[in-house]
Image: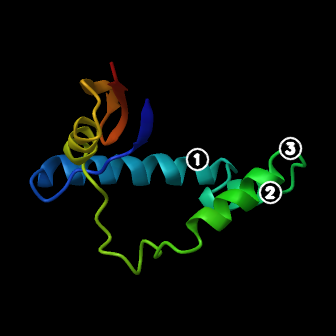
Amino acid sequence: MNGDHMRFDARWPTLQSVASNVRRRVEEEALSKGEDDWAQWWERAERLPRLAPLKAARDAFYASRPSKRASSGEDCPVDFHIAALRHAGFSEVGTAWQILDNYVIFGRRD
């Protein structure tokens, strides 16, 4: 199972726009209610003794990856993830759950 944001690409401009607008509204509403943004959430996690080593491992893992701003800015769409799992030998692959461009992808290997 892989749950992630798998943004709509240029093939789906209307869905891309709707998903982006919904995501922005949800994030703005959460922030206005005092919820953490992404960076604040990770800062809070880092202060918890049980999560601090996991946060450090995450930071080390992602240290060599370019930031979103430095990369093309386009996330991999869901069909890329599904094709990659099939290429890796998973015989049964598909979407188990989806809301707009947030997915949980299922893969099973025999």
Q: Position of residue 38 (x, y in %)?
A: 60, 57
Q: Look at 34% across and 32% down and name the residue there.
A: 99
> Dot 3, crowdedness within 10 Å: few (<14), some or many (≥20)?
few
Color encoding of the figure:
rainbow
Q: Position of residue 88 (x, y in %)?
A: 29, 40
> Which structural element holds mark 1?
helix
The circle on residue 50 is: 3
The residues tagged by marks 1 and 3 sit, at their Cα atoms, a distance apart of: 26 Å
The residues tagged by marks 2 and 3 sit, at their Cα atoms, a distance apart of: 9 Å
> Which structural element holds mark 3?
loop
> Dot 2, crowdedness within 10 Å: few (<14), some or many (≥20)?
some
Say if 72 sits above or below 107 in the image. Answer: below
In front: label 1 or label 2: 2
Viewed as shown, does residue 94 lie left or right of 69?
left
Residue on which disc 2 sits: 46
The circle on residue 30 is: 1
Q: Look at 73% across and 56% down and name the residue there.
A: 55
